[in-house]
Image (tube, helix red, strand yellow):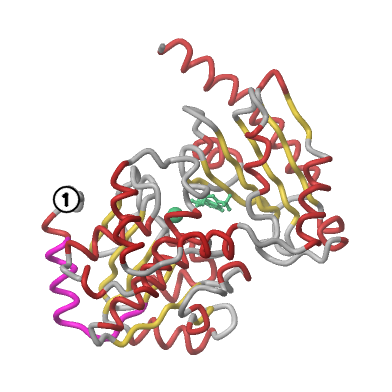
Amino acid sequence: MLQPLIEESKVKAVRKLLEENDRIVITCHMSPDGDAVGSSLGLMHTLSKIGKDVHVVTPDRIPDSLRCLPGAKEIVPYSKYTDFASKLLREAEVIFCLDFNALYRVDRMSDALASATAKKVLVDHHENPEDFADIIISYPRQSSTCALLFRLLCRLELFGMIGRKAATCIYTGMMTDTGNFSYNSNDPDLYVIIAELIRKGINKDEIYKKVMDTKSLNVLKLHSYAIANMRVFEEQKAALITLSAEELKKFNYRKGDTEGLVNVPLSIPGIIYSVFIREDEREIKISSRSKGDLRVNDICEKFFNGGGHINASGGELNCSLEEAVDIFMLTLPEVERQLLDKLKQK
Ligand code: 5GP
Ligand code: MN
C-alpha cells in the first residue's frame, strides 16, 4: 500500500480541471529522456482512456531508444511541426508540464508555452520549481516523474485506467532515471509501484533490453573510444570525458548515442565526480554525475548554466570545447571545497 504523498488540495485541483476540461496537451523538457517521454506518454494513454482529447508536444525530437514506447509515433515535436504544436498549445484548456522545473527547459518552445492561456499543471521532481504553473506538484525526493505520476493517477482514482501501454511508459521513466534501479532506488514504494505495473501486464525485462541495453556497433565503438580517452584527476576524485564534433562525426553520432557514458567513470573506486563534455551543433553540452553528498546541481548551476539533481545534472555553454574543459578545471577546487565542508560537518 502506498502512503499518500501529494497534498490533497493539489489532487482536488487537478481532479476539478479534468472534470471541467477536455482539450489537454502534455509537454516535457527539451532533449527528452526516458522519464520525460515515459511520463508524457503514460499520462496520454491514461487520459485518452477517460475520453480526453490529448496530445503530447515535445520541444524537440525524442531519441531513437524511446521510439519503441507505445504511442511514441503520436508525439508532436515542436521543432519539426512548429505551427501545429503552437496551435495545440494555444487551444489547450489544460497543459501538463512534466519532468521540468523552469520554462527555459523547453528551449525555443518557452514563449509558446508561457503565452498559452491553458491552466498549467507541473508534475516534477527537480529542486526549486519556477512559479509558471497554476498547480505545482513538485517532490524532489521522488526518483522519477514517472513514479510521482503513478502516485498522482492513483490519487485521482485513475489507477483502473492505467493499461499495459501506460504502465510500460511509466515503468520506463522509473527505470531510466534510476539507472535500472542502481541509484536513487532505495525507496521501498518504488517496488510496490513496479509490482502493480507488472500486474498491469508490462514486460520489464523486455523494456530494459529495448530501452537501455540496445546499442549499435558504432555506439559501442564510440563509448569505447571515449572511455579510452578519459582523464582522471585522482586528487579531486574526478573524471572527464570529452567528445568533439569531429570525433562524433567519425562514429556517425546520432542524438542519444552517448546516453549512459557519463556514468561509466563512477565505476572506478574512489571516483565520485564525473563530467562529460560534448560538442553539439549549436552549443557545448555538459552532463555530470556524482556519488554521495557531492552536489553536481550546484556545480552545474554555477559553472555550466544548468542544474538538475544532486547526483545527476547538466548544462550548456556557448564556447569552444577547449574553453569548456578550462571551465571544468575551475570546478575542481569547488569540488574540493564541497568535500572539505562535508568533512567538517561530520
Ligand atoms: P543528462 O546528463 O542525462 O543530460 O541530464 C541529467 C539531468 O540533469 C536531467 O535530468 C536534468 O535534470 C538536468 N539537466 C541536463 N541538462 C540540463 C540543462 O541544460 N539545464 C538544466 N537546468 N538542467 C539540466
Ligand atoms: Mn526525471
Residue type beneath disc 1:
Pro
Query: Quick one: 126 or 254, which is closer to the camera?
Result: 254
Q: Position of residue 22 (x, y in %)?
A: 24, 85
Q: Residues within 10 Å of mark 1 (few under 14, many from 20)?
A: few
Q: Quadrant of ligand 2?
A: bottom left
**Residue 12 belongs to magenta span:** yes
Residue at image point 44% right, 76% down: 112
Q: Please give left or right for residue 4 compared with residue 56 in the image.
A: left
Residue at image point 51% right, 88% down: 83
SS at circle 1: loop
Query: Quick one: 95 or 131, which is closer to the camera?
Result: 95
Residue at image point 39% right, 55% down: 101
Q: Position of residue 192 (x, y in %)?
A: 28, 51
Q: Quadrant of residue 329?
A: top right
**Residue 119 belongs to magenta span:** no
The magenta stretch spans which residues? 11-25
Q: Position of residue 38 (x, y in %)?
A: 44, 66
Q: Please give left or right for residue 80 compared with residue 131 in the image.
A: right
Residue at image point 52% right, 83% down: 73
Residue bearing the label numbered 1: 4
Q: Please give left or right for residue 263 compared with residue 164 in the image.
A: right
Q: How many marks?
A: 1
Q: Position of residue 10 (x, y in %)?
A: 17, 59
* Quadrant assignment for the C terminus: top left
In this rendering, the answer to whether 303 lies above or below 98 is above
Q: Would you say the magenta stretch is mainly helix, strand or loop?
A: helix
Q: Is mark 1 within 8 Å of ligand 2?
A: no
In this rendering, the answer to whether 14 lies above or below 339 is below
Query: Quick one: 66 or 279, which is closer to the camera?
Result: 66
